[in-house]
Amino acid sequence: MRIVLLGAPGSGKGTQAHRLAERSGIPQISTGDLLRAAVTRGSGLGLAAKEAMEGGRLVDDALVLGMIRERLAEPDARAGFILDGFPRNLVQAAELDGLLGELKQPLDAVVQFEVDREELMRRISGRRTCADCGRVFNVLTSPPPSGAAAICPKTGAAHRLVQRADDNEATVAERLRVYEEKTRPLIAFYQSRGLLRVIDAAGEVDAVTQRLARALGLAARAGRNRRARPAVRRAVRAKAAARVVKGRRAATRGAARRKPAGKKPPPRRAPKTRRGAAPKRGGTRRRGRR
Ligand code: AMP
C-alpha cells in the first residue's frame, strides 16, 4: 500500500497515519516529523529549515525532496508507505510522481481529510505532544488517559506534554493560508489521476479511523476474510478427507485387479517373487531357458 494523506494542519493526518501504520505494518513518513528531528539534532538541514517552520511557511522544496528521496530508499519503505504532510505543493507532487515512476512503485491512493476551519483551530490550539515518545494528545478533545495508557513507553513515567512551537495563533493562521494557496491545488491534481478519495475527518478519532479504512477498502477486506476463513478451512479439510478416501478405494481396486489378472510384478519385486511366490515354476522355467 502506497498512499498519501492530504489535509490542512490539524486535520488529523498524523494521528490517523500513526494508527494505519500500526495496523498495516508499513511506515508512516511525516516530513514535519523528519524536519523537527533535524532541527532538534541541529543538523545542516535542521538549521536551514528552522526559520521557515517557525514562520509557518513551507521549507525549501530541494531540501524536502532530498530528505524524502533518502527516506523512500530505506528498506522498510519497499513494502509501502503512508506519506503524511508530503507532497505540500504541485512541484513536490510532480517530483514524487517522477521518483515513484523510476522506482516502479506508483501511488495506490490519496486521501483528502475534510475538516472545517473552526474545528481545525480548536484541534490545533489543544494539541500537545509527548516530548519523549512523540505521541499526540489534545487537551480539549482527547486528553491523555489515566492508568497504564498515561505512561510514556520511552521513559516509563507520565507523558511530558509540550505544545509545538508552530501551534501558536499567528503561525497557525499562516499555515492555514499556505495550505489553501499551495496544498489545496493537489486535490484537483490527484483527482485528475483517479487517485483521490475524500473523507469527513471531523468527529471522534475512532470514527475517522473507520472512514479512512473504508476509503482504502481495508475494513471490507478484513471483514470478508474473517467470515471466509472458517469456511475455507472446512473446505480444505473436506477435500483432504475426500482425497484420502479416494486413495484408499483406488488402492483396494488396484490390488483386487492385479491378483486375478496375473500381471507381471514390478521389476523391484521380481526377486521376491522368484524366491517366494512361485519358486519352483518360475525358477525352473528361467533356469531352463538360459
Ligand atoms: P507538519 O508537522 O506537517 O504540520 O509540518 C510542520 C512544518 O514543517 C510545516 O509548517 C512546514 O514548515 C514544514 N514542512 C513539513 N512538510 C513539508 C513539506 N512537504 N514541504 C515543505 N515544508 C514542510
Image (cartoon, rainbow, N blue to C red):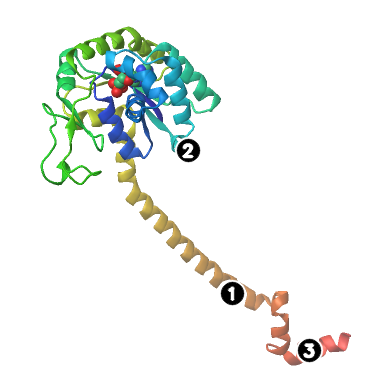
**Disc number at residue 75?**
2
Q: Position of residue 24 (x, y in %)?
A: 35, 38
Residue 128 position by quadrant: top left
Residue at the extreme right of the image, as rendered: 290
Q: Earlier in the sequence, mark 3 or mark 1?
A: 1
User: Mark 3 = which residue?
Assistant: 283
Q: Position of residue 284 (x, y in %)?
A: 81, 91
- The amino acid on which the numbered mark 2 sits, given as a three-letter code, is Pro
Type of amino acid at the residue the image marks with label 1 = Ala
Q: Nearer the viewer, mark 2 or mark 1?
A: 2
Where residue 87 sits, quadrant-wise, is: top left
Mark 1 nearby-residue class (10 Å; few <14, some 14–19, many ≥20) = few
Quadrant location of the C terminus in the rendered image? bottom right
Contact, mark 3 vs mark 1 (Cβ under 8 Å): no
Q: Marks 1 and 2: in contact by CB < 8 Å? A: no
Q: Secondary structure at mark 3?
A: helix
In x, y percent, where is residue 156?
A: 20, 47
**Residue named by callout 1:** 255
- The amino acid sitting under disc 3 is Gly
Q: Residues within 10 Å of mark 3 (few under 14, many from 20)?
A: few
Query: In the displayed structure, does residue 39 sit left or right of residue 103?
Result: left
Q: Nearer the viewer, residue 76 or 230?
A: 76
Q: In front: mark 2 or mark 3? A: 2
